[in-house]
């Protein structure tokens, strides 16, 4: 019985934490899985070097064995939608009613089929979108087309309305830089129009793109 397995493990886990035990009999309840190092974009602020890493089959199998105990799992990349067996993995995880799944994605590869699957499975999405103007978006997210991200968020909105039983909390990640800081206020209306629940604004790391980091050196005008 899936419910019994989950609830028994949760009870043991919370007791062991309360008792401040170091060696636990209970299984993990939260998990982050890096599915791949592959990415379909070359964003100017990304510090990761793209690679062909894909989670080995035996690790996929290990992850599936933990599903009965989880209440949260985060799928990340690279770009998760480049992984061939991700769809099967997502559907398998959806069989377990206590798991809140979360996907971090640039969103470009979301099709109508994917949007419907995500909505039916009640999966939370975190879209990475750094600009709402075509030229700036495509400058920051090299290899992307602005029309594709608008299509993707539209598909998700439609699927949520048609299939979602109880809509999860969806977010947009925005990396703040010189090219987009004047646009940040526009994300509020965009989030409302496409039924996003939150905006995560993050600072740019380092000086890998000369002049883009408004915090290094500190740009008082931009900060204001």
Image (tube, rainbow, N blue to C red):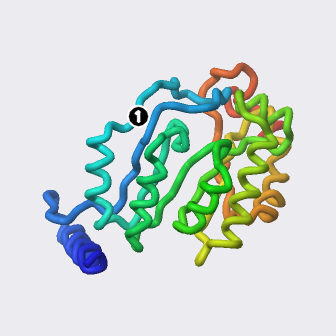
Q: Position of residue 30 (x, y in %)?
A: 36, 59
In the image, taking residue 48 as reference, residue 93 lies left or right, namely left
Q: Is residue 63 visible?
A: yes
Front residue of 80 and 170: 80
Query: Where is mark 1, residue-wise?
Result: 54
Which image quadrant for residue 168? bottom right
In the depicted structure, whether residue 140 falls above or below residue 8: above
In the image, taking residue 160 as reference, residue 48 lies left or right, namely left
Classify mark 1: helix, strand or loop. loop
Q: Position of residue 112 (x, y in %)?
A: 67, 55
Residue plotted at (72% across, 58% down): 155
Residue plotted at (75% across, 23% down): 211
Q: Is residue 18 visible?
A: no
Front residue of 45 and 107: 107
Which image quadrant for residue 58? top left
In the image, taking residue 61 as reference, residue 218 lies left or right, namely right
Q: Position of residue 71 (x, y in %)?
A: 38, 67
Which quarter of the image is occupied by the C terminus? top right
In the depicted structure, whether residue 89 falls above or below residue 197: above
Density class for disc 1 (Cα within 10 Å; few <14, some 14-19, many ≥20) is some
Front residue of 86 and 49: 86
Which quarter of the image is occupied by the N terminus? bottom left
In the depicted structure, whether residue 121 falls above or below residue 185: below
In the image, taking residue 17 as reference, residue 97 lies left or right, namely right
């Amino acid at each position: 019985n899936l419910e019994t397995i989950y609830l028994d493990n949760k009870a043991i886990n919370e007791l062991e934490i309360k008792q401040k035990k170091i060696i636990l009999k209970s299984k993990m309840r939260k998990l982050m899985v890096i599915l791949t190092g592959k990415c379909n974009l070359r964003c100017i602020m990304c510090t990761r070097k793209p690679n062909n890493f894909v989670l080995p089959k035996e690790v996929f199998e290990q992850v599936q064995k933990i599903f009965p105990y989880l209440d949260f799992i985060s799928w990340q990349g690279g770009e998760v939608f480049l992984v061939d067996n991700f769809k099967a993995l997502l559907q398998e995880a959806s069989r377990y009613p206590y798991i809140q799944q979360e996907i971090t994605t640039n969103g470009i590869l979301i099709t109508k089929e994917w949007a419907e699957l995500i909505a039916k499975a009640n999966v939370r999405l975190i879209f990475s979108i750094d600009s709402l103007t075509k030229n700036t978006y495509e400058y920051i997210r090299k290899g992307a087309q602005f029309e594709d991200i608008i299509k993707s968020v539209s598909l998700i909105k439609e699927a949520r309305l048609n299939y979602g039983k109880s809509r999860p909390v969806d977010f947009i990640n925005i990396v703040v830089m010189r090219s987009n800081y004047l646009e940040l206020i526009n994300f509020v209306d965009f989030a409302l129009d496409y039924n996003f629940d939150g905006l995560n604004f993050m600072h740019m790391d380092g000086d890998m793109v000369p002049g883009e980091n408004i915090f290094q050196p500190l740009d008082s005008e931009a900060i204001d």
